[in-house]
Amino acid sequence: MRYNEFEDTISPERMQRYVLACGNDTRRAMTLYRYNLKLSQEMFTLISCFEVSLRNKINKEMVANFGNDWLRDFILPGGRFDTDPRVDGTRKIIKKAYEGLIRSHNYSHTKLLAEMEFGVWKFMFNNVQYRIANRCLLNIFPNKPTSTAQHQYDNTFVFNDLNVINTIRNRIAHHEAICFGNPVCIDTQGVLDCYARIMRLFHWMNINANTLLYGLDHVGQVSSRIMCI
C-alpha cells in the first residue's frame, strides 16, 4: 500500500508522530506502525494471562477468608465495601456488574469475577481496600522477598507494579502507541519495564511464567526489531 493510502486509512493525525520519529521516512513510519501493533498484540497476550492468574490467586485467598460469594457479599448492604465511602468507586463497579447478572438471571460468583476489569484487582492492594480485606492478600505472593528498611515489598509496592501494568493495558485497549518514549522518540523501554514487573509478580505468585507463556512470549524480539527500524 502506498503511504498516502495508508495515511488516509489510519489518519494523518495518528501517523504524524510515526513520521516524525522516522525522520519523515514514510516507509519506515508504516513499518513502525505495524510493529507497534505487533508489540501491542504480544503485550496484551501476556497481560491477559497475568490478569487471569492474578484474579484467580486473589479469589482463592478471598474465598478462604470470606466465603464463596465474597465479591457479592462485599457490596451488599452492610458489606465491607458498602460501609466505607472511600471505596465507593469499586463498590459501584461490582454492584453494576452484579445487578446486570441478576437481571439476566445469570448470576454466579465465577461470572461476577469475569465481569471485573483489571483496575478492580489493582485497587485491592491500595491501602484502604487492603485493610478492608484484613491485610490478607500478600499471601498470594509466597515468593515475595522479605521487606527491609531500605526496600518495602508491601501492598503499596504491588499496587505500583499493577498500576504500571494497568496503564500499558489501557493504552493497548484504546489503540494508543506503546513504542514511544516521548511523542517523537522511538523507545520501548517502558514496555520492557512493564514486562519485567509482570515476570516479577508471576515469580512472586510461584507461577512458572516460562512454561505458562510457552510459545507466546516474543516481547523481547519484537522490541528489538522496533529499535532497529
Image: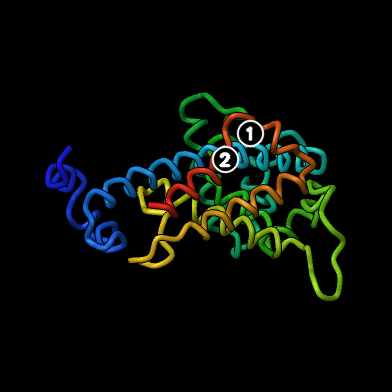
Q: Residues within 10 Å of mark 1 (few under 14, many from 20)?
A: some
Task: Provide the residue designation for mark 1.
Answer: 213
Mark 2 residue type: Leu
Asked if marks 2 and 1 touch (Cβ < 8 Å), the reply is: yes
Q: Residue at x 74, y 33 (%)?
A: 68
The N terminus, quarter of image: top left
Q: Nearer the viewer, residue 224 or 196?
A: 224
Q: Is residue 167 above or below residue 40?
A: below
Query: Residue 187, image x and y in percent?
Result: 45, 60
Q: Is residue 98 visible?
A: no
Q: Nearer the viewer, residue 78 or 124?
A: 124
Q: Residue at x 75, y 38 (%)?
A: 207
User: In the picture, residue 217 is in which quadrant?
Assistant: top right
Q: Residue at x 52, y 43 (%)?
A: 221
Q: Does 217 sit left or right of 176 as displayed?
A: right
Query: Residue 91, image x and y in percent?
Result: 57, 52
Q: Is residue 187 visible?
A: yes
As drawn, which residue projects farthest toward the front?
228
Query: Residue 153, image x and y in percent?
Result: 78, 63
Q: Residue at x 43, y 65 (%)?
A: 181
Query: Residue 148, image x and y in percent?
Result: 86, 70
Task: Provide the residue designation for mark 2.
Answer: 46
In what element is the residue under mark 1?
Answer: loop
User: In the picture, residue 35 is in which quadrant?
Assistant: top left
Q: Does 157 sit left or right of 101 as displayed?
A: right
Q: Which mark is residue 47?
A: none
